Amino acid sequence: MKIIKLSFLVLPLALFASSCKKEEALGPIDNIPGLGGDTWASTSTDRWIHSNLTLPFNIGVKYKWDQSELQSDMDKTLVPPKEEKIIPVMDAIKKAWIDPYIAEAGLPFFKKISPKFFVLEGSPAYQSGAIKLGTAEGGRKVVLYNINGFRIKGMPGYTPGDTATVIEMFHVIQHEFAHILDQNIKVPIEFSASSARSYTSDWLNVTEQDALDEGFITQYSISGKADDWAEMVSMMLVYGKPWFDQLVNSINYTGTTASGTTAAEAKARLRQKEASVVAYFKQAWNMDFYSLQTRTKTAINSLLY
């Protein structure tokens, strides 16, 4: 299961004191990578990013390897992204995330609210038995992993099995953007009122089915209110309304769960949260959520099928 919430990791700092007989010169600072001396020749990839993301939306993309951008992953083995993946990835993100939001809410909204910096990594990161596919920091920086596994229709080697990786990437972005919306205009407390007693920090030990039977759209959404909100928004946008309706209607168990929830209550929770999402988008941002949902799902389908 992916980890896609805001995450912070405090690393211990070891201080070493030593003495020596003679101090050796460090040499020119411009010979130390990352301290102002390293330069990169602009490539066609850089020019595409500048023209298609930086100029219109003030979004920067960093894909050249820089371990300092991954402070929480210093203990993990990661690889840089392949450059031939960068434009397809960011173009797909533009079509499936940026364009639908602009169509619904306008360019000024998106430029004001969107994250401004993407960091791309070639491989996934593994943490506590989960696969980390993305993180966000302060609503402005998003790190996306597993870029080298990205393939869509028309790319060499693409198979229908690649859709899961691509959809998860869109899921990550929509999840993080839902957090950003909440950070700017808070989601009403009514969204989580019916689910409050079922949240648990031990979400990795809850199955997808058990979470659904409690009225949660994913296993991860049971971890707390903020991620319940972000998962509802992201999953409904990425998978579409027919999928959501089918998911809700699939809850048909008899009796109650261990916490005393009936199937009818679980369905009602999901429908209540769906209504809260729709109302929030309209009241807070003057957006028709169902229209945004249709635009997003249509864009994703055009990339994959």
Image (tube, rainbow, N blue to C red):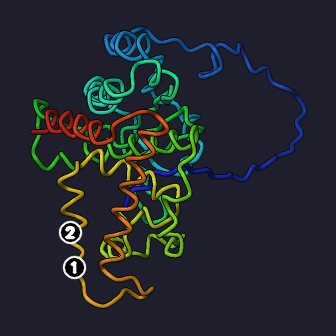
Give x and y (percent) for residue 128.
Answer: 49, 64
Q: Quick one: label 2, few (<14), some, or many (20+) residues within 10 Å?
A: few
In the image, farthest residue toward the bottom: 255
Image point (43%, 62%), residue name: 221
Q: Look at the numbered discs 1 and 2 and tell me whether their residues touch, using CB distance below 8 Å.
A: yes
Image point (46%, 34%), residue name: 285
Q: Quarter of the image holding residue 26?
A: top right
What residue would you read off at disc 2?
A: 249
Q: Quick one: label 1, few (<14), some, or many (20+) residues within 10 Å?
A: few
Q: As rendered, which of 121 and 200 lies closer to the eye?
A: 200
Quadrant where the C terminus lies? top left
Q: As rendered, which of 277 and 111 lies closer to the eye?
A: 277
Task: Inspect the image, locate mark 2, and give the three-letter code of the amino acid beneath it.
Answer: Asn
Q: Quarter of the image holding residue 92?
A: top left
Image point (49%, 38%), residue name: 284
Q: Is residue 277 visible?
A: yes
Task: Inspect the image, locate mark 1, and give the three-letter code of the amino acid beneath it.
Answer: Asn
Give x and y (percent) for residue 160.
Answer: 10, 47
Secondary structure type for disc 2:
helix
Q: Is residue 73 above or below residue 45?
A: below
Give x and y (percent) for residue 15.
Answer: 81, 47
Q: Quarter of the image holding residue 267?
A: bottom left
What residue would you read off at disc 1?
A: 252
Q: Is residue 84 visible?
A: no
Quadrant where the N terminus lies? bottom left
Q: Is residue 293 above or below residue 206?
A: above
Secondary structure type for disc 1:
loop
- Would residue 10 be found to the left or right of residue 4 on screen? right
- Would residue 80 be found to the left or right of residue 163 on screen? right
